[in-house]
Image (spheres, rainbow, N blue to C red):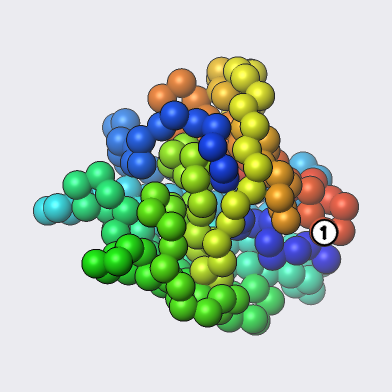
């Protein structure tokens, strides 16, 4: 069965990017179709909203695999990031993976980002750590906080250059490919505006997961 670690990871140095990215132009949202071996199994949606002091990012992941009327697998994650003056300030996230509950909370304090999670003891994250929610290419430049369980992630990131990448409607765009290797292996693509375009990963059962922008 699918491994939870492949949905949100779901870096070390590679990308000279700021610690934040601008809000997505016009739409204020990023929506992905998620497939397993090319069969759709759900959606991953991000909503961006301005606040008086910055902006919030709301993340909703809803995935399920069924055999006829029998649901074999489900995964639901809801998270909210708060950014102030271009700096990451807090995260509240909850996950239901086949009935197993997980969480992560992050708060900026005087001594840095204080993290608590279902898979880690309370700790202070390194300066510059960002949530691994993938919308912000700057996450690849340093340690990341797993929104599912609070664990600190330090994968090896390699820049593979520009490629043509398919969207969910079949159209293609130019995007930069990043190779993520560690406990989990992912491939991420970002367009010329540094916005997240696609993701692929090998699941624990050998199947292929893919995210394509809608």
* Residue 127 percent coordinates (x, y): 38, 54
Q: Quadrant of residue 187?
A: top right
Name the residue furthest left.
52
Q: Could you tell me residue 129's position as x and y percent?
A: 43, 53
Local crowd at mark 1 within 10 Å, few (<14), some, or many (≥20)?
A: some
The residue drawn where x is 56% and y is 76% is 120
Q: Position of residue 209 (x, y in %)?
A: 73, 47
- Residue at 55% x, 70% y is 149
> Can residue 170 be seen from the camera position used here?
no
Residue at numbered disc 1: 204
The quadrant of the picture occupied by the N terminus is bottom right
For label 1, the SS is loop
Query: Which residue is depicted at the point 67% across and 35% down?
Result: 179
Q: Residue at x 87, y 52 (%)?
A: 206
Q: Is residue 175 above or below residue 130?
A: above
| Nearer to the camera, 50 or 119 | 119
- Against 112, residue 36 (above or below) is above
Q: Is residue 170 left or right of residue 45?
A: right
* Residue 72 falls left or right of residue 154: right
Residue 16 located left or right of residue 120: left
Q: Which of 18 and 75 is in front in this view?
A: 18
Q: Which residue lies furthest to the front in this view?
A: 111
Residue 112 percent across, percent down from the top left:
32, 63
- Can residue 54 be spotted in the picture? yes
């Amino acid at each position: 069965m699918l491994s939870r670690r492949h949905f949100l990871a779901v870096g070390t140095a590679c990308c000279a990017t700021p610690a934040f990215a601008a809000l997505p132009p016009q739409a204020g949202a990023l929506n992905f179709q998620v497939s397993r071996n090319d069969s759709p199994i759900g959606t991953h949606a991000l909503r961006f909203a301005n606040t008086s002091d910055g902006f919030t990012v709301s993340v909703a992941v809803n995935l399920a695999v069924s055999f006829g009327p029998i649901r074999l697998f489900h995964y639901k994650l809801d998270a909210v990031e708060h950014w102030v003056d271009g700096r990451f300030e807090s995260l509240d996230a909850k996950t239901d993976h086949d009935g197993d509950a997980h969480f992560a909370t992050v708060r900026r304090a005087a001594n840095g980002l204080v993290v608590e999670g279902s898979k880690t003891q309370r700790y202070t994250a390194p300066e510059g750590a960002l949530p691994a929610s993938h919308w912000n290419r700057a996450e690849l430049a340093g340690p990341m906080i797993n929104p599912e369980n609070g664990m600190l992630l330090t994968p090896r990131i390699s820049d593979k250059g520009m490629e043509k990448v398919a969207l969910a409607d079949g159209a293609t765009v130019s995007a930069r490919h990043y190779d993520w290797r560690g406990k989990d292996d992912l491939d991420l693509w970002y367009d010329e505006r540094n916005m997240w375009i696609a993701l692929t990963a090998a699941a624990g059962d050998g199947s292929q997961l893919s995210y394509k922008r809608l």
